[in-house]
Image (cartoon, rainbow, N blue to C red):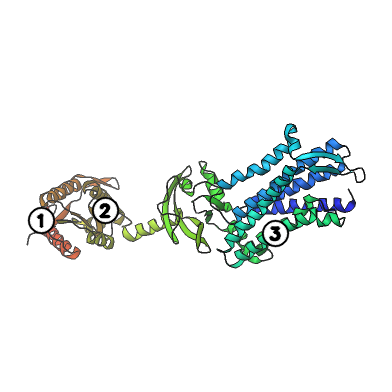
Amino acid sequence: MDGFQLFTLMLSLLISIAIGGYVFVYRHKAGAKPMIFISLFIMFWNLVTIFEYSVIDHDSKLLWRNLAQISGFMLPYVIFYFTLDFTETKNKKPFLALMALPLIAITLIFTNPWHHWVRSGTYINSDTGHLVVDVTLLGLMIVLLNMAFILLGVIVLLNHLRQTTGKHRKQTIVIILVMIFNVVLTIANLTVFDVIGLRVLTSSLYTPSLILFFYALFKYDFFVVSPLTKDRLLVVIDHLVIVVNPKGEVVEWNPAAYEHFADDHQITLREGMRVNALFHKPLQVPLKTNSHTQEIIHKDATGERTFELHFHPLFTKQLYSGMLLLIENITSKKSYEQLLKMRADYDALTQLLNRTAFQKAFDKLSGQSYIMLMLDIDDFKAVNDTYGHAAGDEILAEIANILKRIIPPHCLTGRLGGEEFAAAGIDIFQATALTMAETLRKEIETVPFNINGAKIHVTASIGVAHTTFKSGFDKLRHQADNAMYQAKEKGKNTVCLYKD
């Protein structure tokens, strides 16, 4: 081997390693995975060719040449498969059967009983020291059929070209030209180059094509800020970012998403998994739709958390090609919102609905009949004056607990202000409402309140209003209030029913 050929092989080897490594990093790009195999086969072919020309004896040279033929026969098929992946052909399984051709050729080469079917003989040229292989007619036909994979790939790309626009169309055109260039270069090496005495090693012929493939696939990602910004953004963003294909299978994610689901200890985020599996239950909204947001409660090994899922569909030339899923952990936000709602709707001392929230909740009630109870603690000002406001607050809080205990859960309870409490409900008989009010009165009367070591008792006057038609809050409250004042006038610590 002369110095130029060795230099060519070494350069081709280094280029294939560099390109293969780069493509592996960005392997989620359409067409990138088959291109990794293209790089590996070219790398392997150059490497074993160097070994072939480094040994002297016939058997060693033949061994390395046979190993080189693995790449020689597999490369055209892998290039064809690259076109299927690049064009995002959905069903690739029928084309897997075509791999039988290169596999048959490799089997014939490495099998002694059938070796002569593709080769009539091998010998070392005494002048050059190179191994010469005489190919049979069948062997030549297999080689030509194998090269036809590249032409088949061109047909696939030409068909795809009709459906593409913009930069993707330019990429497709460049790849078509590269594949045609590869076929022309191979034919020229077998014909013109031999005639003019220029010997180019076949393993090096694919390297220019590899470079052009690489350029066509990634040229719009070079020397521009956008891809760098995108990659950096995926690293620093707090949101969990997951990209899924049209089948709802995960194809890419950012570090935050991987770390989050790694902490789950039940799920490992991996390529090809169904995105539904990440949340232990099916997502209610289909993946293929317009942009939308969904809130889910997620239970895992770390506890219960609330997530907001933002779905953004991805389209390629008006064709749905997947979904960008942004996941935001809003557990703290929801807790804060609930706290704000609690502060806005509930009385801080008694944890009952305040006047405004009580009225809003009452206005939403709908039934055949309505009841309202108004409760006022008797002589509460005297309690505050005697024992202090802190003691008064303790009594208010305990009476609120009594209300929660006696008033059914489906009814409303609230503190409307000061020592005035209310309860309301629907579809409750008048007699039942009176019984409820009387039970409440007796409970308050009998409960001793421990205030600064002294046990005191308080009483309450309760008014009950009942109607069989939808009544406004103010009207029904006014009726219950009037009944309560009637109870006060009757000597307090009693229950009165409002009557027209």
Instruction: Identify the residue shown where x is 61% and y is 57%.
Output: 155
Residue sticking out furthest to the bottom: 166
Is label 3 or label 2 in front?
3
Element at label 3:
helix
Tell me which label, 1 or 2, sits earlier in the chain.
2
Element at label 1:
strand
Q: Nearer the viewer, residue 433 or 392?
A: 433
Q: Position of residue 76 (x, y in %)?
A: 69, 50
Tell me which label, 1 or 3, sits earlier in the chain.
3
In the displayed structure, does residue 484 sit left or right of residue 85?
left
Q: Nearer the viewer, residue 234 or 405?
A: 234
Mark 2 sits on what residue? 396
Q: Is residue 35 visible?
A: no
Mark 3 sits on what residue? 180
State yes or no: discs 3 and 2 in contact (Cβ < 8 Å).
no
Mark 1 sits on what residue? 497
| Amino acid at dot 3 | Ile
